[in-house]
Image (tube, rainbow, N blue to C red):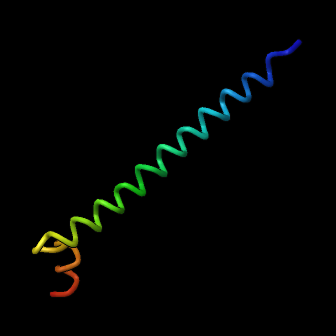
Amino acid sequence: MTHLPYVAASYGLALLVGVAFAADAWLRMRRAARRLEAIDPRGDPRRNRKRAG
């Protein structure tokens, strides 16, 4: 009996968990940026530079 299905499943699961963590981090960063934009009176300095120039 070969162990290939178990090894492939474990690598697939590890990849799936990694992608899920990355997606969660990306979504949390977007939410945090929106919340900061809502409460920060200065706004985004990069955006302000584009408006001034």
Residue sitting at the far left: 41
Residue 36 image point, x, y percent:
21, 65
Question: Which residue is at a point 16% across and 70% down the rendered structure image?
Answer: 39
| Residue drawn 80% across the image and 21% down it | 4
Question: Along the horizontal axis of the image, is 5 left or right of 45?
Answer: right
Q: In which quarter of the image is residue 15?
A: top right
Counting from the top left corner in percent of width and height, residue 43 is at 16, 74
Q: In this view, does 40 lie above or below 4?
A: below
Residue placed furthest toward the top? 1
User: Compared to 24, does 46 lie above or below?
Assistant: below
- 40 sits left or right of 14 in the view: left
Question: Residue 14, located in which quarter of the rendered image?
Answer: top right
Q: In this view, does 52 lie above or below 10?
A: below
Of residue 44 and residue 38, the one placed in the foreground of this image is: 38
What is the quadrant of the C terminus in the image? bottom left
What residue is drawn where x is 21% and y is 72%? 38
Drawn side of residue 37 relative to residue 6, left or right: left
Residue 36 is left or right of residue 1, and the answer is: left
Q: Could you say which is closer to the camera, residue 50 or residue 18? A: 18
Circle count: 0
Q: Say above or below: 15 vs 8.
A: below
> Which quadrant does the N terminus fall into?
top right
